[in-house]
Amino acid sequence: MTKRRLGVGFIGAGFNARFHIRSWVSVRDSDILGIYDKNFDTALEASAIAKNLKVGDAKVFKSITEMVADPDIDAIWICSPNFTRIEVMEEIVSAIESGKGKLIGVCCEKPLGRNVAEAKKMVELVKRAGLLDGYLENQLFEPTVQRGKEIIWKRGASTAGRPYLARAAEEHGGPHSPWFWEGTLQGGGVMNDMMCHSVEVARFLLTDPSKPRNSITPVKVTAHVENLKWQQPHYSEILKNNSSGKLDYNNRPAEDYARAVVEYVDDQGEKLIVETTTSWCYVGAGLRLSMELLGPEYSMQINTLDTDLKVFFSRDVQGKVGEDLIEKQNAEIGLMPVVGNEENTYGYDVENRYMVNSFLEGKRPMENFEDGLNVTELLMTAYMSAEQERTIAFPPPGLDDFIPLVAKGEWNPRKKKH
Ligand SMILES: NC(=O)c1ccc[n+]([C@@H]2O[C@H](COP(=O)([O-])OP(=O)(O)OC[C@H]3O[C@@H](n4cnc5c(N)ncnc54)[C@H](O)[C@@H]3O)[C@@H](O)[C@H]2O)c1
């Protein structure tokens, strides 16, 4: 089935869905025509954003089934919380299998699942329904990542040899919604939440653009997780207060710092290294994404806080607390970096343009649910490594059934020490 315009419906209309909606001003041949959120008012707000931006006459639906059944909806973007993945995907598939509706494809935000079993279930469901699938890993689509990779491979690797080391980091002061902080709901702490980006963008940079994903193979994972900040009494109290008492970081913390080294070999047997680090305890101007790619005679680096636009406010400018300058902003005065177009810088524009085009052309996106599953497998091996305090050969036995202690609500580094 090929179409000229793609009608897209969103499941989940929170923080992330709004990034996608705002990015749609740069997406051609597609309209946002549906929104479903468990909270009806949130869906109404997101629909108003889409209408104001003229990116689609987004109708608010009362259920996923109703949205899939609407003939104007050709594809779904899943942007609801991690703990809803399977129920959401099962409802989409059930609506299709019972003949209530038809779709071309589904895109799913990171992570594809909270563990390998869930990610595998997502792959199985999408295949069973015969849908095209896109895994929404925006950092791969950052214009600087795409352009940097192109230049390094064309100029550097072709004359001096392939890159051998990629570094990626994502850091900020902590997530915006309480469910992210709860290991059982989110699937882990900062490692599951943000290292999914870093391992995948580093893997992408190291992969020869003319070769498939499996031209480099992960062989070993060594990881470390800690809680450095948010289990301190003052900060655990803040989390408790911000969650109406639900978050208990004295007894059920999640890691707020993680580091992993993934060792790969390429198709010539050469060793490649991915170094990633992520944290929810970085207090700088706001979200900082950094990437590096190094080879025998060259290197590249990206830091999203090295912005071309900076503003300065003296101490007499008593502005309101907000995120109007940068995502996860920490201050309102002094010299502040401003990302001119966050949807573009973080990759949402290019990602959504690419996914829409793939679906319209009836082609499976190059970043799909299998990639989401690969990322989950690496992250779960990283949790195993951190728990066992040793390097783990990939893939380890028992990976399919492994659930990290933090995702069971059983991880507490302070208890272990005392
Ligand atoms: N790519 C990125 O950089 C990035 C950034 C943020 C979040 N995310 C991912 O996007 C997803 C959503 O995160 P968020 O930041 O928007 O969270 P959020 O808490 O801001 O919003 C989640 C929304 O989903 C709704 N919801 C809850 N259960 C639902 C259900 N069963 N069906 C439909 N809607 C439901 C909530 O009412 C809420 O409006 C997560 O999986 C997260 O990991 C990705």
Image: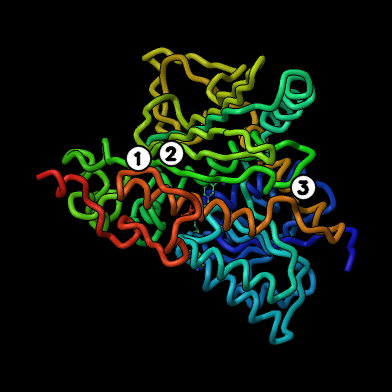
Q: Residue furthest left?
A: 418
- Position above or below: 347 against 32: above
Q: Return the x and y of residue 313 as percentages of the image width and height.
A: 45, 15
Q: CA distance from mark 1 to mark 2?
A: 6 Å
Q: Residues within 10 Å of mark 3 (few under 14, many from 20)?
A: some
Find residue 19 and name its label.
Answer: none
Nearer the observer, disc 2 or disc 3?
2
Q: Which residue is mark 3?
A: 354
Secondary element under disc 3, as helix, strand or loop, is helix
Q: Amino acid at mark 3?
A: Tyr
Q: CA distance from mark 2 to mark 3?
A: 29 Å
Q: Which residue is mark 2?
A: 260
Q: CA distance from mark 1 to mark 3?
A: 35 Å
Q: Amino acid at mark 2?
A: Ala
Q: Amino acid at mark 1?
A: His
**In the shown orientation, is residue 204 left or right of residue 70?**
left
Closest to the observer, 90 or 338: 90
Q: Quadrant of residue 223?
A: top left
Q: Residue furthest bottom?
A: 98
| CB within 8 Å, label 1 to label 2 | yes
- Position above or below: 6 against 87: above
Find residue 224 and name its label.
Answer: 1
Q: Residue at position x 77%, y 47% from top? A: 354
